[in-house]
């Protein structure tokens, strides 16, 4: 088997087959494949969507307003249906499942992130299939990852998986929208995710799920940088999961980054959202990118936004392009006073100092 540990993400469109209810025949078919791989020594983490769709089905398609509370209600009802369905289906193959419902808040905090990681490892060690979804019933927009493409990519970092399999209702990423353009060609392999590719991916969401190709590209980038290969393929294709694990060329494959990030940096990339930004001069930008240096006050030319010590900030280069992000040791008020100054002068200016560097290289990840 080519892969040891894979995260399989199943979108709502795969689970419902485009209908308004869970397609149990399709689900059992996917479970059969995952059970086969599991029994052949491959560890599977399942990231499932479909809670809201299942809730609608269970409540017999109620007419609801578009509020957060209505969606949370559907998710609360639907998630229990969804997990019950998975539990029953995996049980056919004698396998147990364990449910983990997460929000961004569980991943932002380093300690909670590490707890989630331990929990995932424990499930896998006991041969239990972890089933992950966003905790939609309690998550508000502010604390949501927002889509399961990105959530599954975060799971790749958390589980240190070597493959992320994004199964959807399309055969992969095309060079034009296949729904509207019959000449569209499947892109079979991607080494670099650049702006051109992002443009191609455009916005091609389905009506039931949250993600489209755009969120799949974000997810692919995150997972690649964690050292995993990523494949987007059609969930309906027969034996798709097994064939991919046997290294058959199916769908669109994104090759893993050649220099994967170590664990803490993965968390930095995945976790806390930035709350402000710091603009660097040319010398500091170069030192951060090329030499992997820490950021010193001296190289700072401007501060944007208000942030606290320990917050995530974006580092912009001299022309305003994002080059990195990292955790700052000084809050924005302090930085306004010490920017451009030598490290030795920090204490004199502020009356205290939290050390010579503003963003330490260990707390910084290059874009
Ligand atoms: N968490 C959502 C659900 O279970 C799905 C989000 C997504 O499809 O990306 O309904």
Image (cartoon, rainbow, N blue to C red):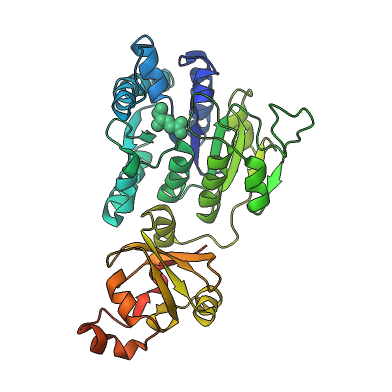
Q: Where is 265 relative to 204, above or below? A: below
Q: Residue furthest top?
A: 60
Q: Nearer the viewer, residue 231 or 198?
A: 198
Q: Residue at x 62, y 47 (%)?
A: 198
Q: Nearer the viewer, residue 181 or 357?
A: 181
Q: Position of residue 349 (x, y in %)?
A: 26, 86
Q: Name which quarter of the figure residue 85 lies in.
A: top left
**Residue lying at 27% horizontally and 34% vertically, measured from the top left:** 138
Q: Residue at x 35, y 24 (%)?
A: 83
Dividing the image into four quarters, tell me where ligand 1 lies. Answer: top left
Can you give x and y, in whole percent of width and height, for residue 50 in the image?
43, 24
Task: Depth check: give the residue in front, 337 or 52.
Answer: 337
Residue 88 visible in this rendered orientation of the protein: no
Identified at 70% across, 30% down, the residue is 178
Location of residue 75 by image quarter: top left
Identify the residue at the far right of this view: 183
Q: Tag count in the figure?
A: 0
Where, by quadrant of the figure, is residue 299 drawn? bottom left
**Does 366 sit above or below residue 151?**
below
Residue extending farthest left:
351
- Looking at the image, residue 190 sits to the left or right of residue 9; the answer is right
Above or below for 176 versus 56: below
In the rendered image, which quarter contains the N terminus?
Answer: top right
Residue 89's x, y, as percent?
42, 19
Residue 208 visible in this rendered orientation of the protein: yes
Q: Position of residue 12 (x, y in %)?
A: 48, 25
Is residue 47 placed above or below 53 in the rendered structure? below
């Amino acid at each position: 088997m080519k892969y040891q540990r894979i995260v399989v993400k199943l979108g709502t469109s795969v689970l419902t087959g485009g209908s308004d209810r869970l397609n149990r025949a399709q689900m059992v078919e996917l479970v059969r494949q995952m059970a086969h791989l599991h029994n052949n020594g491959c560890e599977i983490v399942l990231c499932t969507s479909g809670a809201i769709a299942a809730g609608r089905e269970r409540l017999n398609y109620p007419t609801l307003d578009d509020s957060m509370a209505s969606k949370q209600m559907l998710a609360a009802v639907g998630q229990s249906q969804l997990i019950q369905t998975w539990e029953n289906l995996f049980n056919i193959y004698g396998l147990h499942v364990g449910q983990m419902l997460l929000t961004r808040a569980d991943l932002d905090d380093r300690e909670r992130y590490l707890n989630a990681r331990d929990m995932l490892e424990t499930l896998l060690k006991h041969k239990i299939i972890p089933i992950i979804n966003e905790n939609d019933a309690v998550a508000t927009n502010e604390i949501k990852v927002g889509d399961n493409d990105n959530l599954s990519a975060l799971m790749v970092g958390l589980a240190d998986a070597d493959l992320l399999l994004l199964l959807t209702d399309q055969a992969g990423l095309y060079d034009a929208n296949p729904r509207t353009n019959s000449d569209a060609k499947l892109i079979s392999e991607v080494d670099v995710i650049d702006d051109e590719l992002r443009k191609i991916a455009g916005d091609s969401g389905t009506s039931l799920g949250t993600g489209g190709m755009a969120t799949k590209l974000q997810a692919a980038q995150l997972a690649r940088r964690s050292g995993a290969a990523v494949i987007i393929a059609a969930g309906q294709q027969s034996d798709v999961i097994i064939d991919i694990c046997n290294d058959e060329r199916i769908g669109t494959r994104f090759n893993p980054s050649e220099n994967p990030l170590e664990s803490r940096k993965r968390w930095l990339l995945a976790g806390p959202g930035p709350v402000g930004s710091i603009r660097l001069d040319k010398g500091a930008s170069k030192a951060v990118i090329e030499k992997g240096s820490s950021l010193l006050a001296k190289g700072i030319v401007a501060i944007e936004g208000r942030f606290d010590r320990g917050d995530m900030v974006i580092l912009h280069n001299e022309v305003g392009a994002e080059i990195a992000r990292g955790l700052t040791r000084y809050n924005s008020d302090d930085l306004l006073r010490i920017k451009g100054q030598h490290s030795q002068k920090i204490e004199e200016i502020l009356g205290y100092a939290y050390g010579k560097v503003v963003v330490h290289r260990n707390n910084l990840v290059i874009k």
